[in-house]
Each structure stands twice: as structure tokens, then as C-alpha cells.
Amino acid sequence: MSAYKLNIPTKRGSILNGMLFKTEDVKAETVLIAITGIHGNFYPNPFYFNFGETLNSGGFDFIYAQTNDAFNKINTFNVVTRKPEIIGSWNEYFSYTDEDIDAYIDFAVSEGYKNIILAGHSLGANKVIYYLSRHHDKNRVSHFLILSPANLEWLMNGVTQNEKNIVRSMVENGKGKNMLPFEFMGWVPCIADTAHDWLFSQRLNNVHVEIDKDFSQVQQITHSGALLIGTYDNFTYGNPAGFLSNINSHMPSSNENKLIFIERTGHTYQRKEQETANKILEFVKSCA
């Protein structure tokens, strides 16, 4: 196995930093691209190393694909403006989702992979759902892997009404690019525009515990694949298996999809990182 840092330019010019875990002896025809969630970097989510090493052992490549919010702040460079810039969870816009994912897929296509599997963890899973509801080219993406999608309504429960009012007022008064006077969700320093996306944009609010909520994005996905979650995932009001099964039941490909439950672990697969990686390898082998 060899690991290479990636600098992936987007159409708007921002450069996204990723990592390619590459097989050494034989050129892989299949690559799994994993879109990260908020603060989904290697530090809190070391399972990405297990994913890369395990997939390489099976003859497959792996791209750890950071988007804007893998860290709170990322010093980078904009190839359009030719100026340094700082991106991160502090100033992300959910409208960047399409071009962020496209940038990684474009890279994989340029590398000659014949089989591209698109995965996403946590908020990255919601981004993959949004992307695949709008993009149906199976020559670019063959299958999906949804890992522990984020229930945005559960996450927003910790935001007080007063905080919501502050966010709305700042955006309506032209102060959307100003920092909030509090940490959003209690742990994310960010501008008002970013918090407004979390609270009021429906762009990534696409999975739910309830059967009768808006699953319109899920219903538009024409790809098939797998959905995975830990049975202790606490983003699901206590029913991870029901949460995942409910999402799958709204997919046109529900009968083709594989549901994978990792027992006795949570949202980031603590102490079950290798078991999770092994299950992912099994799934990728079935797609190759």
C-alpha cells in the first residue's frame, strides 16, 4: 500500500485535500471514494486508515475525500482567484456539494478507474444522497455506500430558539458572512450563512427516523448499493436499525441494496474499525 496526498481543485477554485490509498503491485480498476462529514478528518475518524489498508489488501484503491468541513479551518489556495483562502466548517455552503463531489469523481475518471463506488460518512452520506438524487450516470458512479447518515433534525435539537432567531436575523440583515456570537450546536464556530444552511436549507436534510417525512431525494436515486450503521449510533433516537431500514425502504433499489449493521459500536465505529472495514471490502468485492 502507498498513500498519496491529493489536492483536488473545484470549479469555484477552492482546493480540497484528500488522500489516495493505492495498491502497489497491480493497477486497481475499482476505487471507493469516501466523502467525509463535518470534522470527519483522520484525527477523530481513524477508521479511514483501516478502510484504505483493507481495501488495498483486496486489490482496490481508496480515496479519503475531504470536502469543506473536514476541519474547522483549512488553509488552502484558490486556483481561480490565485489567492490563499481559508475554508472549513466555519464557512461551508451546502450548495458546494455537487461540485465538491464532482471534483473527486472527475479525478477518479481521469485516473482511468473503470468502477467508481461513491461512499459518504455522516454528513458526507447526506451529501452523497443529495448528489445521487441529481446525477444518474452509472458510467461515472457504479454503486453507493451510505455510512451512518446524519439525522439533521436530531442535531438541530440542541440549537435554542434564541440562537435560531439570531442566525435568521443576521442573514436577513446582510450579516451572513459574520461569525456567530456563539458556537453553533455547541461545538462549531461558524458564520451565520453556514448555520442558516444547517437550520433552514433542506438540501441535506434528506434522511429521517419518521416514515412520513420528506424522502424525495432518496426516492430519486437510481443507483443501488449498501447502507451501513453501528447499532449504538446515537443520531437516531435510539433505533439505528430502524433508521437505516426506513431510509432504504424509500429507495427504488431497496430490494437490491445491502443493509450492514455493525454490532455494539457508534457513529464512528469505535473498537469495530477493522470489522467495519472488512464488511466494506466484502461489499466492494461484490461490486467489482
Image: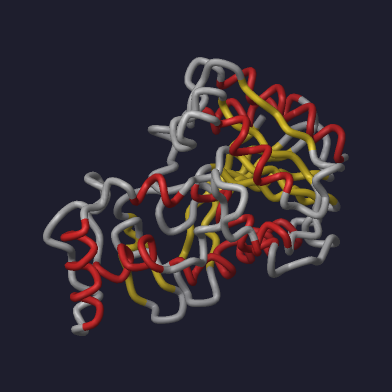
Q: Position of residue 283 (x, y in %)?
A: 79, 32
Colour pattern of the rendering: secondary structure
Residue 55 placement: quadrant: top right
Residue at 68% from the left image edge and 25% from the top image edge: 54
Query: Where's the N terminus, which quadrant?
Result: top right
Rendered view: 263 above or below 280? above
Residue at 81% from the left image edge and 66% from the top image edge: 137
Q: Position of residue 23 (x, y in %)?
A: 73, 34
Residue in the foreground of this view, choosing between 195 and 67 = 195
Q: Position of residue 88 (x, y in %)?
A: 35, 57
| Residue found at the very far front of the displayed protein | 212
Rendered view: 14 above or below 255? below
Query: With 131 as the anchor, is 204 left or right in this view?
Result: left
Query: With 36 as the anchor, is 39 left or right in this view?
Result: left
Residue at 43% from the left image edge and 59% from the top image edge: 68
Residue at 39% from the left image edge and 33% from the top image edge: 43
| Residue found at the very far left of the displayed protein | 181
Residue in the foreground of this view, choosing between 270 and 23 = 270
Residue 17 visible in the picture: yes
**Count of labels in the image:** 0
Query: Where's the C terminus, which quadrant?
Result: top right
Residue 214 placement: quadrant: bottom right
Q: Position of residue 169 (x, y in %)?
A: 19, 75
Residue in the foreground of this view, choosing between 67 and 268 = 268
Residue in the foreground of this view, choosing between 61 and 224 = 224
Residue 142 visible in the picture: no
Query: With 216 as the anchor, is 168 left or right in this view?
Result: left
Residue 2 placement: quadrant: top right
